[in-house]
Amino acid sequence: MKIRKFLKNFVPYSWEPSTDDIANSIGKNPDEIIRFDTNVSHKTPVDWLKQLSNEFDNLEINRYPDSSYVSVRKLLADYCSCDVDDLILTNGADEGLFMVGSLFIEPNSDVIISTPTYSYYEKMIQILGGNVKEITRNPDFSDNFTKISENVDTNTSLIVLCSPNNPTGNLVNKNSLEQLLKNFDVPIVVDEAYFEFTDSTVSDLVTSYDNLIVVRTFSKAFGLAGLRVGYLISSNNTISLLNKVRPPNSVGELSVNLSRIALKNINWIENNVKEILSEKQSFIDRVSEINNVEIIPSTSNFMLLKFSNDNGSNIYEKLLHKGIVVRDVSGTKGLEDYIRINIGLPDENNKLIQAIEEVSV
């Protein structure tokens, strides 16, 4: 059976192993494993699930959902302070990214990414036949907009940025981004998956620049990673173009209804973010007192840690055997000495800090 030639040697995106698989690999029970590797909220919005269960009798699960998802988009428009026609609902942020790539990436065209960053960008570009053009970040991990601008040419089909950037936690400089939007007629996608944890967004620029697309998700601050709902924000003109490549009915009826419930309970999301950021500050205060550990400043619910007494891969393994799962980013160029963690619940964070103290000796 023939497959596309480039896929024969293609290394796919590295999915996170299941908790059961992790537990089996180190001889522990799944309930002994605490995960700090996926950047999700550790708090489940149980009340929303109860509300959804009360609606089960009225859910026409035998039918396709309204393919415009307008009931959700109206609520999103209020939440995002934008026009309802500036939005597309997607099956997670990754589908949104793939839609953007499908619209703009020509075979053998160049796509600029600012590295290190979310590893799925590279995979998406390669699957769509584009060439990945990596621009190394500045020493403080901020985007090097000078180098990005210097590398834009007639073969550039897309620029992909992340704000806050995963895994480094940097925000995109809004002024620099606007200059890029003004100077080049090249589409720029900004991934704002974690924007609720910041006071910063670039989404207000979409009405001025057709070449800006913002990607967001319900997976992080909303506590709904398992729901698989995301959305795109762009100008009316660009949204019309993106609808050309939008898959039919990719967001299911249960997801549509739970999304609607979530958007009617914004206070829960705001409180969840406050609690996470409060825990984050407590975590920083305590870990800052531990020898051999450096915390890289982050504007999100995750952060990089650097250990002066060992490399990132070894630290990952040591923590793993204590039942603590962090993200091993040591295979990424420029992050050889780092691990990435996200903030969990208070008792989970206490266990993480204790484990960090033990491995940093």
Image (tube, helix red, strand yellow):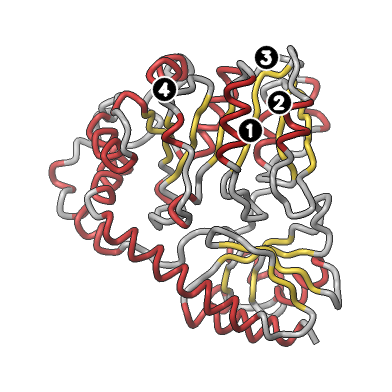
Taking the spot 38% from the left edge, 32% from the top edge, the residue there is: 89
Taking the spot 81% from the left edge, 29% from the top edge, the residue there is: 8
Q: Earlier in the sequence, mark 2 or mark 3?
A: 3
> Contact (CB < 8 A) between labels 2 and 1?
yes
Kindly identify which residue carries mark 3.
Answer: 106
Taking the spot 64% from the left edge, 86% from the top edge, the residue there is: 354
Q: Secondary structure at mark 3?
A: loop
The residue type indicated by label 1 comes to: Val
> Contact (CB < 8 A) between labels 1 and 3?
no
Q: Earlier in the sequence, mark 1 or mark 3?
A: 3
Which of discs 1 and 3 lies nearer the camera? The answer is 1
Pointer 1: residues within 10 angstroms few (<14), some, or many (20+)? many
Q: Secondary structure at mark 4?
A: loop
The residue type indicated by label 3 comes to: Glu
Report the number of numbered marks.
Answer: 4
> Contact (CB < 8 A) between labels 2 and 3?
no
Pointer 4: residues within 10 angstroms few (<14), some, or many (20+)? many
Query: Is 105 in front, or is 134?
Result: 134
Pointer 2: residues within 10 angstroms few (<14), some, or many (20+)? many
Kindly identify which residue carries mark 4.
Answer: 235
Res. 3 in view: no
Judge left or right: residue 264 versus residue 133: left
The residue type indicated by label 2 comes to: Val
Q: Secondary structure at mark 1?
A: strand
Kindly identify which residue carries mark 2.
Answer: 111
Q: Earlier in the sequence, mark 4 or mark 3?
A: 3
Taking the spot 29% from the left edge, 35% from the top edge, the residue there is: 77
Label 4 – label 1 distance at C-alpha: 17 Å
Kindly identify which residue carries mark 1.
Answer: 160
